[in-house]
């Protein structure tokens, strides 16, 4: 079994959307260590499952407040949360599907 902390190799900023959907702002919510793995697809993939933006599966230590109104800053990129992927067998971590939105 792989040590969980060894998977957390990337430093990411966390931002939360504050305010109503039309007139809110992104506010900083600290930093986290996470593991990013590209998900099949992306701008170079052709076929029925074509995805226009690169997607990643992000794994991080479990923490409250991560949801659809969260985004991550990574290497100058903004990664928007598309889906939370809870696994109650692994309660110490959170897995999130994110999409690179520039």
Image (spheres, rainbow, N blue to C red):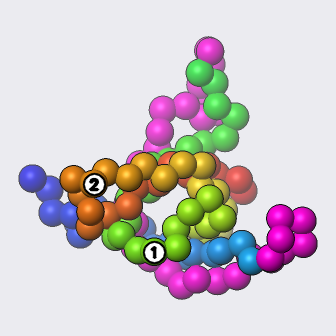
Q: Residue at x 38, y 61 (%)?
A: 94
Q: Nearer the viewer, residue 38 or 72?
A: 72
> Do labels 1 and 2 touch, CB within 8 Å?
no
Helix, strand or loop at mark 2: helix
Helix, strand or loop at mark 1: loop
Residue 15 placement, left or right of 7: right
Residue 25 placement, left or right of 29: right
For residue 76, above or below residue 86: below
Q: Give the residue pinned by disc 1.
A: 64
Instruction: Please state the horizontal and vertical placement of residue 90, each as a whole percent of the image.
Output: 24, 57
Q: Work out whether residue 50 can be spotted.
A: yes
Q: Quadrant of the C terminus?
A: bottom right
Q: Nearer the viewer, residue 76 or 35?
A: 35
Q: Nearer the viewer, residue 50 or 20?
A: 20
Start-end of magenta stretch: 19-48
Q: Which mark is residue 88?
A: 2
Residue 46: name its quadrant.
Answer: top right
Instruction: Please state the horizontal and vertical placement of residue 5, each as a whole percent of the image.
Output: 23, 69
Residue 7: name its quadrant.
Answer: bottom left
Q: Residue at x 64, y 31 (%)?
A: 51
Q: Residue at x 9, y 53 (%)?
A: 1
Mark 1 vs 2, N-terminal side: 1
For residue 68, above or below residue 50: below
Q: Nearer the viewer, residue 83 or 50?
A: 83
């Amino acid at each position: 079994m792989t040590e969980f902390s060894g998977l957390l190799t990337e430093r990411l900023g966390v931002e939360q959307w504050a305010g109503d959907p039309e007139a809110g702002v992104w506010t900083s919510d600290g930093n986290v260590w996470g593991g990013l793995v590209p998900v099949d697809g992306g701008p170079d993939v052709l076929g029925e499952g074509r995805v226009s933006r690169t997607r990643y599966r992000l794994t991080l230590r479990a923490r409250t407040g991560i949801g659809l109104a969260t985004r991550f800053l990574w290497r100058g990129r903004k990664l928007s949360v598309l889906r939370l992927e809870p696994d109650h067998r692994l309660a110490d971590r959170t897995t999130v599907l994110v999409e690179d939105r520039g």
